[in-house]
Each structure stands twice: as structure tokens, then as C-alpha cells.
Amino acid sequence: MRGWAGFSHEHRAQLVLMVDEAAQGHLRKLQRDYLGSPRLSKFQENRLWTAIRESYRHAALAFAVCVDVFVTAQKGWEELKPAMTLLSVRAVRAAAGQMKWQYVRYGLQDNALWGMVSRFTRSPSTASTPPRR
């Protein structure tokens, strides 16, 4: 959904929110399976971990597209104004989930992810007017 040009900003945001909501139950199950199983093979462990981390990564990127429209005051940014709080919170949650699961395997953090989080938290507090470039 990130790259499809045919969607309005509002429609894309609604789709991202719906997919994220639908995925939460499945994601919780995968996390329980990973953390609750005492003996997973390396293959199973890697497969579950990758699915969980990638789910958070793709969600964070999809929310980033929506938030970026507002932050950069692209054409049609006004459509997203009512949903910016929810979009920003979900974006931060997805980025935090990605960070957390990276730490589960003692991985290094990607500094670009922190930059993305700073964009999420910067604009919604000043949602009355578009940010200046």
C-alpha cells in the first residue's frame, strides 16, 4: 500500500489502519509461540522472529508514509488531520515493536529507525497548521 499512487491519502490511511488492526491478533499469537515455546529449532525460531519483526517493520513504513504526508504538508494533507493522533501512535507502536524484536536477538539498532520515530512524534502536537518547510 505504500507505493500505490492511485489512493487518496485518507483512503491509504484507512487501509493501513484496517490491515494493522486485523494483523494484531495474529501478531500476538506469533509472539506467544516464539516466547512460550521452550524448545524451538533454529529454523522455527528464525522463521517466527523474522515474521514478527518484518510485520512491525512493514507497519512502521506504511504508517510513515501517512505521517510524512502531513509532516511535509503534501497536497491533501488536510484529509489526514482528524486521524493524525491515531496514525502517529500506531506508527510509534510499530517502530517500538521493531526495535524490541531486534533486541530480542541482540541485534544492532538501525539509526534510521530513530529518525523515523522522531518524525512521528514531531508533527501531531502542532496539528492545527501544516509544518513549514
Image (spheres, grey):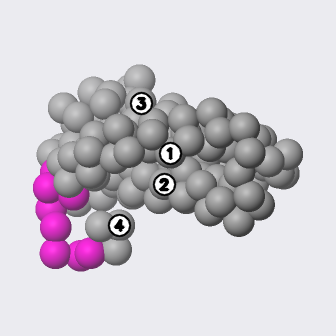
Q: What amino acid is labelled 4 in the image? A: Arg
Please indicate whether residue 103 sits to the left or right of residue 34 in the image.
right
Name the secondary structure under disc 1.
helix
Most foreground residue, 86 or 9: 86
- In the picture of the structure, the residue carrying the numbered disc 1 is 30
Q: What amino acid is labelled 1 in the image? A: Leu
Q: Who comes first in sequence, dot 3 or dot 4?
A: 4
Q: Which residues are magenta?
A: 4-13
Residue ranking furthest to the front: 39
Q: Which tag is nearer the camera, tag 4 or tag 2?
A: 2
Most foreground residue, 73 or 133: 73
Q: Who comes first in sequence, dot 3 or dot 2?
A: 2
Q: What amino acid is labelled 3 in the image? A: Val
- In the picture of the structure, the residue carrying the numbered disc 2 is 55
- Label 1 vs label 2: CA separation? 11 Å
Q: Which mark is residue 2?
A: 4
Q: Which tag is nearer the camera, tag 1 or tag 3?
A: 1
Q: Who comes first in sequence, dot 1 or dot 3?
A: 1
- In the picture of the structure, the residue carrying the numbered disc 3 is 89
Q: Who comes first in sequence, dot 1 or dot 2?
A: 1
Please indicate whether residue 7 sits to the left or right of residue 43 in the image.
left
Residue 92 rendering spot, x and y as whole percentages: 51, 35
- Label 4 vs label 2: CA separation? 14 Å
Most foreground residue, 104 or 122: 104
Residue 130 rendering spot, x and y as whole percentages: 32, 40
Residue 97 included in the magenta stretch of the image: no
